Image (cartoon, rainbow, N blue to C red):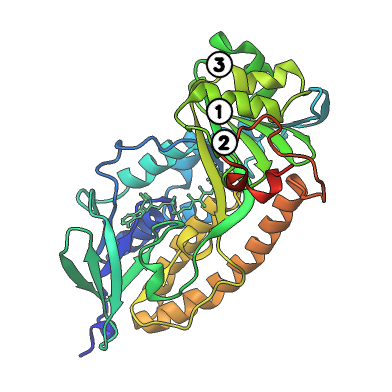
Amino acid sequence: MSLTTRPRPRVAIVGAGPGGLVCARVLQRHGVPVTVFERDGGPDSRAQGGTLDIHEETGQAALRAAGLLDGFLALARPEGQEWRLYDRHATLVRHDRAPEGDLSRPEIDRGRLRALLLDSLAPGTVRWGRAARSVTPLPDGTARLHHEDGTAEEFDLVVGADGAWSRVRPALSGARPAYSGVTMVEVRFEDVDRRHPGIARLVGDGTMSAKAGRDSLVLQRNSDGHVRGYVVFRGPEDWHAGLDLADTGSVRTRLLARYEGWDESLLALLRDNDGDFVNRPVHVLPLPHTWPRVPGVTLLGDAAHVMPPVGTGANLALLDGADLARAVLDHPTVEAALDAYENVMLPRAHTHAQTAAHMLADLIPDPDTDAPLFPDAVWPTDAARPESARR
Ligand SMILES: Cc1cc2nc3c(=O)[nH]c(=O)nc-3n(C[C@H](O)[C@H](O)[C@H](O)COP(=O)(O)OP(=O)(O)OC[C@H]3O[C@@H](n4cnc5c(N)ncnc54)[C@H](O)[C@@H]3O)c2cc1C
């Protein structure tokens, strides 16, 4: 008998992000043996960072399927749905607050969501410090998972839930994420209400964004007085050429030059942040991203469809995870399950990725301009300058 016709397939999930964990939880709840292989050494080995708004129709639907919606709502911050838009003079041009009782898009710290999902799994389900290297589909419809340590194991289904730079994806598709033209530089503030009252006033209880041309400044309130911000601009990926990114003072000087003329209250985001600046160039997969069906292997979440971070990625990853698990439970073979799952997931991801690309273009337009992106940048040689920064 082919392994793929076993009633309870052996499933390996690569990656303990939101998508992989919700998939594991739904499978395990219904008696399917599942192992999650995660590169991180442990649940606390890396700060999970950031806040996620979890949407009723996608992320929350997935958490309901996992039996975790009540647990999520107990941790979520409905007041985090507040949204403020400023211009570069710090004039408030729009202010939205969710009505009392609105739970359509509450926020949750990414670390709290991960802990909720991890705690719902049987002990030992996640194998920490087990990075995947690659996957080989086998002629009998199963797949071999190769670990970074040189060992390998066979499963009826290997799920790539390992994010934008997936090691599983090459078994299905040659696509690789490309730079979107937009960079986010992350900043952090601790104990904001006491130590950074100006930042606390700007952000309120939720998210604030200030915009002008190709530049934007964003702040998001997390739990426990933590605020995370993003300096968002359109420009070359090597905007930091000639700088040591670990040299906070030099990075600050370059960013301040770019935001010259912005209101001082907004520039506090660049001047007063705690710790370093974290460079996060936005990479996206080309569209459309699809693949011919390969027995025993599939992808979910960012591994399948990394798209601009406009509030969709984690929600789709959760929904993919729940949908894939449901398909495995509802179909007699892994192959039938993958057909059903991919026939829904791929077109859905395509539609969302197109919308996300348009939203990014609206948020950070790309006007035809000769203005230098970083007027005070000192490039090591003229040839080293990105073309868009040449004068
Ligand atoms: C700055 C920023 C802000 C964002 N804000 C939002 C938001 O507000 N709302 C929203 O919906 N989305 C948001 N997103 C997008 C969201 O973070 C992602 O879409 C989401 O995390 C994808 O989930 P995932 O489970 O597919 O992958 P990930 O969350 O990327 O998880 C992948 C996991 O796989 C592990 N891994 C990687 N490689 C290997 C390997 N070789 N072997 C084993 N394990 C491996 C990683 O350690 C990680 O734990 C944001 C993204 C960014 C960058």
Q: Residue at x 60, y 52 (%)?
A: 312
Disc 3 crowd, CA 10 A, few/some/many (<14, 14-19, 20+): some
| Numbered circle sitting on residue 192 | 3
Residue type pointed to by label 2: Val
Q: Residue furthest bottom?
A: 1
Ligand 1 lies under 8 Å from the Cβ of mark 3:
no
| Residue located 45% across and 75% down the image | 173
Q: Position of residue 363 (x, y in %)?
A: 74, 45
Q: Position of residue 86 (x, y in %)?
A: 78, 29
Quick check: marks 3 and 1 in contact, CB under 8 Å? no
Indicate whether 128 appears above or below 78: below
Q: Residue at x 30, y 60 (%)?
A: 28
Q: Is residue 275 above or below residue 229?
A: above
In the rendered image, which residue does mark 2 sit on? 185
217 relative position to 153: left or right: right
The image shows residue 185, relative to residue 352, as above or below, that is above
Front position in the image: 120 or 303: 303
Asked if marks 2 and 1 touch (Cβ < 8 Å), the reply is yes
The N terminus sits in image quarter: bottom left
User: Spatial distance from mark 2 to mark 1, Cα to Cα?
Assistant: 10 Å
**Tag shown at residue 251:** 1
